[in-house]
Image (cartoon, rainbow, N blue to C red):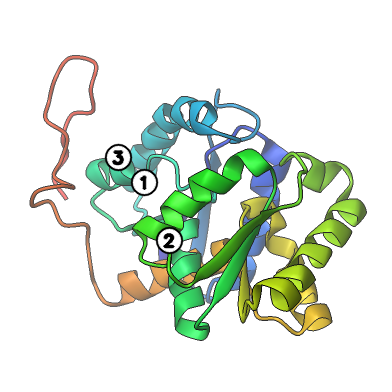
Amino acid sequence: MRIHVINPNSTLSMTDQIGRASRRAASQETEIDLSNGEGAPVSVEGYTDEALAVPAMLAAIRDAERRGAEAHVIACFDDPGLSAAREVAGAPVVGICQAAVQVAVTLASRFSVVTTLSRSVPIIEDLVESYGGGRRCRRVRAVDLPVLALEEDPECAYELIAAAVRAARDQDGAEAVVLGCAGMAEMCEQLTRETGVPVIDGVTAAVRQAEALIGMGYRTSKLGGYAWPRPKSGGFAPEAA
């Protein structure tokens, strides 16, 4: 299997970290094709960053399909451009927020999300609702750290995130916690061990879901909503699946 994992921002160190998490999650025979959003913002923190990141991400997805990718993972918890990516790709496209929410509602009757900045809270709340987890999501908690601070001061970041996980357990009644940023992926196992809460990483969930979709032989439907983009000047020309 060959899975293309894209970090939609342009920070190479975060792309490398996402790559490590993806390869740990993947089966031994799975090849991870890693890319990042060239020319995109250094982090995705809000609607404007999302919009600026999407064009490079779509181009990378098309390039990865030409190289033989059998599925794509968008490794940003805002799932930027997910529907557009499904239009331009024949292979399945998995967003890490959607994958994590699906795991959370399978493992627990109630869950919370821990993310970086407060400005991300309404974005994530809307996504969780759209993925069918709204009633079961107790709260989206922010630790008020910029995304890049996860790398700049990892010890401080970990302590803040661990405290938020415990608060979700003790105050929200959450039975599981979803990590609301791809940059938190490497903290998942330690957080689970130290807090006793099932902590869900979207990168792991998405890579495993992508493997399952490939194994079942599924492709993105091209009937209706995810049909190939119509050919037009300046747009993406359709390609046969």
* Quadrant in the rendering for residue 41: top right
| Along the viewing direction, whichever of 26 and 202 lies nearer the viewer | 202
Q: Residue at x 57, y 73 (%)?
A: 111
Kindly indicate whether the residue at mark 1 contacts the one at mark 2 (C-beta within 8 angstroms): yes
Secondary structure of the residue carrying numbered label 2: helix
Q: Which residue is under mark 2?
A: 98
Is residue 113 found left or right of 218 in the rendered image?
A: right
Q: Could you give the CA–CA distance between mark 2 and mark 1, rounded to whole angstroms?
A: 10 Å
Residue 169 point in image, percent of width and height: 71, 77
Secondary structure of the residue carrying numbered label 3: helix
Q: Could you give the CA–CA distance between mark 1 and mark 3, rounded to whole angstroms?
A: 5 Å
Q: Residue at x 71, y 41 (%)?
A: 147
Kindly indicate whether the residue at mark 3 contacts the one at mark 1 (C-beta within 8 angstroms): yes
Secondary structure of the residue carrying numbered label 1: helix
Tag on residue 82? Answer: 1
**For marks 2 and 3 on the same chain, the one whose residue lies earlier in the sequence:** 3
Q: Which residue is under mark 3?
A: 84
How crowded is the residue under tag 1: few (<14 C-alpha within 10 Å), some, or many (20+)? some
Is residue 196 found left or right of 95 in the rendered image?
A: right
